[in-house]
Every structure is written in structure tokens, then in C-alpha cells.
Amino acid sequence: MNSDRGKSDSLIIPATAVIHIERSDYVLVSESEELTVTEVTVGEVRGSEIEVLSGLSPGATVVGDGAVLLKPAAVEALAVRRRSHP
């Protein structure tokens, strides 16, 4: 699912794309057959969509439905990232 521009400079993505881990929100961005865990700042929920205020580039492809199924892998990827870059 590609991110779309909202009414302001924010982006609109499916609400199902947002994964809540600890006190932060993340999306899984698909790049060159790889998924990258990307921290985002979210705004208003608009039905089945959510506003992304920062952290995501226009046109980025995010995992929508099923993102929650990949949450354990996202948590592990963040843990590895934190150990690599304390």
C-alpha cells in the first residue's frame, strides 16, 4: 500500500499498517524486497486510515493488512538495531 498525501503535509496510510511497540509507533516499509521497521509519528485516525505526521516519505510502500502478524519480527529487528547502535 502506497502512502498518500492528506489535506495538509501529512500522509495517509491504512491504520492496520501501524504497529505499536513500547511507547512508539512503527510501520514496515518495503524497499527492494526487504522490510524496514520505521518509526513514525501519527495523528488523527480517519476511519480505517491514519494520518502520519512524520517519519514516512511520500510514495513509500508500507505493509497494511497483516503488519501486526510481523510484530514479533519487528520487535526483534529493533532489539538488534539497539544493540548495534547503543
Image: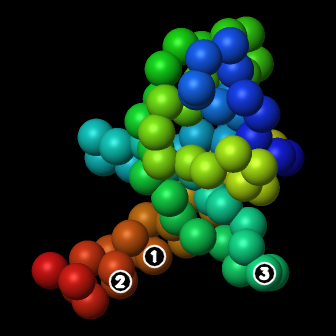
- At numbered mark 3, what does the secondary structure look like: helix, strand or loop? loop
Quote the CA–CA distance across marks 1 and 2: 5 Å
Q: Would you say 8 lies left or right of 48 here?
A: left
* Circle 3: residue type: Ser
Locate residue 1, reporting x and y percent: 85, 46
User: What residue is rendered at 66% in x and 61% in y?
Assistant: 29
**According to the image, label 2 marks what residue?**
80
Q: Residues within 10 Å of mark 2 (few under 14, many from 20)?
A: few
Residue 22, x across and y down, in percent:
30, 46
Q: Image check: 48 left or right of 73?
A: right
Q: Are marks 1 and 3 in contact (CB under 8 Å)?
A: no
- In the picture as drawn, the residue positioned furthest to the front comes out as 9
Does residue 20 appear in the picture of this structure? Answer: no
Viewer-closest of 33 and 7: 7
Residue 72, given in percent of the width and then of the height, sits at 52, 65
The crowd level at tag 3 (other Cα within 10 Å; few <14, some 14-19, many 20+) is: few
The label on residue 32 is: 3
Is 33 in front, or is 60?
60
Residue located at (26% from left, 89% from top): 84
Is 13 located above or below residue 66 in the figure?
A: above
* Whether residue 73 is situated above or below residue 48 in the rendered picture: below
Q: Which quadrant holds residue 17?
A: top right
Cβ atoms at labels 1 and 2 below 8 Å apart? yes
Which element type, helix, strand or loop, lies under badge 2?
helix
Q: Amino acid at mark 1?
A: Ala
The mark that comes first in sequence, 1 or 3, is 3
Q: Amino acid at mark 2?
A: Val
Residue sitting at 73 percent across and 73 percent down? 31
Q: Which residue is mark 1?
A: 77
Q: CA distance from mark 2 to mark 3?
A: 21 Å
